[in-house]
Image (cartoon, rainbow, N blue to C red):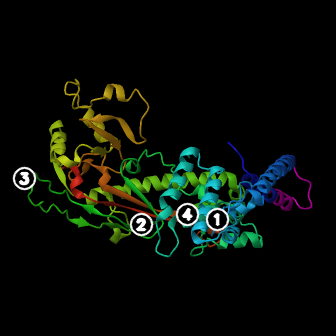
Amino acid sequence: MSVTIEDLELRQAEIAGELARLDAEYAGQVMPEEARGQWNDLGQEHEANKAKLEEMRARADFLRSIADDPARQERGADFHTRSPRVGSDAIWDLVAVRNASRSQDDEARMLRENARRAIDGANFAHPHADQARAKERIEGLLERFSEESDGSGTTENTWLARRILQTGSPTYRRAFSKKVAGRPLSPEEERALSLTAASGGYAVPYVLDPTLIPTSNSSVNPYRAISRVETITTNEWRGVSSGAITVAYAAEGTEASDNTPTLAQPTCIPERCQAFIPFSMEVGGDWGRLQTEMAMLIQEGKDDTEASKFTTGAGHGSTEPEGLLVGATGTVAAGTAAFAIAHLYALQNALPARFQPRAQFVGHRATYNLVKQFDTSGGGMFWGDLRNGFAHQVPTPGSLASTLNGYPTNECSAYAAVLTAGSKILTLGDFRYFLIVDRLGMDIEIIPHLFGASGRPTGQRGMYAIWRNSSDVLSAAAFKTLQTT
């Protein structure tokens, strides 16, 4: 994995903080052998990193001097293309971008270019993060938002580019790690954090932000892999939908019939989701370890909660997403004691023909295990590729790598696992009509001290994380659910 100048600078700050902690802990004493070994190891690493930084900065300065040569700067009537280059601290400097630009469009272009350069050298802490996929995802969002306005005269991708540059800078990452550890900040670091302060919290560095980086394994929550997923930087998603139009043949020279569809404008408002992570002050001093743990804990909790709420959430009025089983109310009855293969054929037949070609099943693994026992001989090929499907790599996380009566199967832990009266056990539908909306950006507030039941400190701090998303059924007719009676 490549290491950038920013990574080394952040590590140097962490080493300095750890050395200061050791010095304070053993002030006026001879260090024990274990602490002395740690001190020496940290000192050696600091010197090695210092040598690397000197060489990398020298190379970066040389490249910048070439890039800043006036003979190489392309100028037009209203703007020039000069912008901070890779390896320079100026890549993160929003004021320098503003000063170098000649128009609002030029500033937006330069911000996007710098954000892309930042992404090229980024390393994502989550152990399950696919580095190439994460970079591709963020670059795609930058491109997608390039012409969309947030209503304030600033393009949405300018907001995203600014957030990347603000929260990805060495100063911000250093300040964030020191804030977590409870160490004092320099005036420059205080200013960097203040740029993203929101209701007392701070924007999480973008390399840790699960609203930006795809790290879910979809093991209990298949919805993101099969549904329509929209990403916004505003407070509301607005779309356009219509019913099927009427198509008709006509004689030559006759007036066309009125086939105008009925248009609707569905909206989806992201709901606030939150997580709280307590951690010891000792762990807080090791930011490298803590950020990996934090990314994993938030993503796992996010997956579990979304699996539940995207299935049974009560909807916007309840400050929850609208779950699939709440928004799509069409059901087909199945007996608990006599659950049989006929119920599955009835479920398929109940789904309107226009939704069948792209339909998929979602249900609990326990239900699929019961279904597998229906066709023991394989004569009906109910599990059409069962014999071959499990022998290959699962093509999509959360998929069971097989089809049920010709339709892909997906596992969701939020569905009923036991057949009791009234249980909704299996859904067949076209998941293009199930919408998930993510609002970009996670904010975190640091709680400096946690207290026990008696009101005394526990030696712990806390992270309170907030982000927003929601889900919505765009067409209830696109889904049918098997419900026991």
Task: Identify which residue is drawn at 83% across, 48% down.
Answer: 55
| Neighbours of disc 4 within 10 Å: few (<14), some (14-19), many (20+) | many
Q: Amino acid at mark 2?
A: Pro
In the rendered image, which residue does mark 3 sit on? 251
Write the start and end of the magenta stretch as one range: 18-32
Q: Are marks 3 and 1 in contact (CB under 8 Å)?
A: no
Task: Identify which residue is drawn at 15% across, 47% down.
Answer: 350
- From what the image shows, is residue 445 above or below residue 135? below
Indicate yes or no whether the magenta region holds residue 136.
Answer: no
Residue 424 in percent (x, y) is at: 25, 51
Please name which of the two marks, 2 or 4, marks the residue nearer to the observer. 4
Residue 429 in the figure: left or right of residue 40: left
Indicate yes or no whether the magenta region holds residue 21.
Answer: yes
Q: Amino acid at mark 4?
A: Leu
Q: Nearer the viewer, residue 354 or 365?
A: 354
| Neighbours of disc 1 within 10 Å: few (<14), some (14-19), many (20+) | few
In the rendered image, which residue does mark 2 sit on? 270
Estimate the spatial distance between the alpha carbons at disc 1 and disc 2, rounded to whole Å: 43 Å
Please name which of the two marks, 4 or 3, marks the residue nearer to the observer. 3
Q: Nearer the viewer, residue 274 or 207?
A: 207
In the rendered image, which residue does mark 4 sit on? 160
